[in-house]
């Protein structure tokens, strides 16, 4: 059993202007957060050959599903979106298959971040609120939070924070090591969210913003995942960008520790 488990990260795709072709990348903050938690990060490219995914999963002790542009809405019966909001089709198809196999045909711990959090739900048959600003009704006693950078016009940039309520005794609360009834302050850069009535098979919501948006999902209490103690957690914010804050570092530590024990 290694003291430094190997953690696989899926990858984004972007156009490389010099060549007018797609390149692959993972933001350095994900790599650093895994490494600082004593994991060994390796990047897993979005192949168009799905037969190699199981081999990829055999190489790693845990999986981080990173953020990015929006997943295609036809996966969950959503409405059409502008093309510039959607990720390249190759990554979209690969990520969905990769997540399905990681969740359902392995025992690996899985941590999903922002779009990766949403991907966990989609892979399990869940759905998304496709645009919080126009499709989400906040409680009457709570003003809407400007969740997306576009909505804020980036005025507060990386310093923007909002509070979360964590379910007492939940995996996300234990992972972050936040005291019961204490709010967790997080960043925010998303315009979509996991649908509270369609979180996905074996999944439940366990953290919320004051305006009611789901910010974390984890195994339902009676699910095989929960009964086996498997670490599966999706968080809507970006803890890898907040590594100077102890609760955010704790999330990666708890994940890597679960990969070590696997």
Image (cartoon, rainbow, N blue to C red):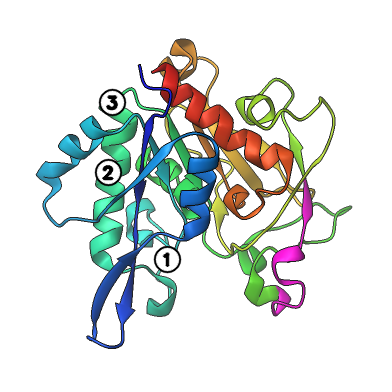
Quadrant the C terminus occupies: top left
Q: Secondary structure at mark 1?
A: loop
Q: CA distance from mark 2 to mark 3?
A: 11 Å
Q: Which residue is mark 3?
A: 106
Tell me which corner region of the image, top left, top right, bottom left or bottom right, holds residue 103: top left
Q: Residue at x 59, y 64 (%)?
A: 191
Q: Which residues are magenta?
A: 152-163
**Pointer 2 residue:** 98
Instruction: Name the residue rendered at 34%, 57% in the picture.
Output: 11
How many residues crowd around disc 2 within 10 Å: few (fewer than 14), some, or many (20 or more)?
A: many
Q: Give whichever of discs 1 and 3 has the lower sequence position.
A: 1
| Neighbour tally class for label 3: few under 14, some 14-19, many 20 plus, Cα within 10 Å | few
Q: Is residue 161 magenta?
A: yes
- Report the side of 180 relative to 205 (left or right): right
Looking at the image, tell me whether mark 2 or mark 3 is earlier in sequence order: 2
In-front residue for pair 240/236: 240
Element under disc 2: helix
Q: Distance from label 2 to label 1 (Cα)?
A: 24 Å
Tell me which corner region of the image, top left, top right, bottom left or bottom right, holds residue 82.
bottom left
**Disc 1 target residue:** 79
Q: Is residue 55 above or below residue 113?
A: above
The residue lying at 13 percent from left, 43 percent from top is: 52
The image's mark for residue 20 is none
Q: Is 82 placed above or below 230 here? A: below
Q: Is residue 203 visible?
A: no
The front one of 127 and 44 is: 44
Mark 1–mark 3 Cα distance, whole angstroms, equals 32 Å
| Residue 98, picture quadrant | top left
């Amino acid at each position: 059993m290694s003291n430094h488990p190997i953690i696989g990260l899926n990858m984004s795709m972007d156009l490389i202007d010099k060549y007018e072709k797609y390149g692959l990348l993972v933001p350095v903050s994900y790599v650093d957060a895994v490494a600082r938690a004593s994991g060994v990060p390796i990047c897993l490219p979005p192949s168009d050959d799905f037969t190699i995914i199981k081999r990829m999963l055999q190489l790693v002790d845990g999986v981080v599903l990173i953020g990015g542009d929006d997943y295609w809405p036809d996966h969950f019966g959503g409405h059409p979106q502008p093309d510039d909001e959607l990720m390249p089709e190759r990554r979209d198809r690969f990520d969905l298959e990769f997540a399905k196999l990681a969740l359902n045909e392995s025992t690996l711990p899985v941590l999903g971040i922002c779009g990766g959090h949403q991907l966990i739900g989609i892979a399990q048959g869940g759905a998304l609120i496709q645009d919080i600003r126009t499709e989400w009704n906040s409680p009457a006693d709570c003003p809407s939070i400007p969740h997306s950078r576009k909505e804020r016009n980036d005025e507060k940039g990386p310093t923007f924070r909002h509070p979360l309520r964590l379910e007492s005794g939940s995996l996300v609360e234990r992972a972050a090591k936040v005291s019961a009834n204490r709010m967790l302050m997080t960043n925010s850069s998303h315009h979509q969210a996991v649908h509270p009535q369609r979180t996905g098979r074996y999944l439940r919501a366990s953290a919320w913003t004051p305006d009611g948006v789901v910010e974390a999902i984890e195994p339902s209490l009676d699910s095989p995942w929960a009964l086996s103690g498997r670490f599966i957690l999706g968080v809507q914010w970006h803890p890898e960008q907040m590594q100077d804050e102890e609760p955010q570092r704790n999330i990666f530590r708890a994940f890597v520790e679960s990969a070590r024990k696997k």
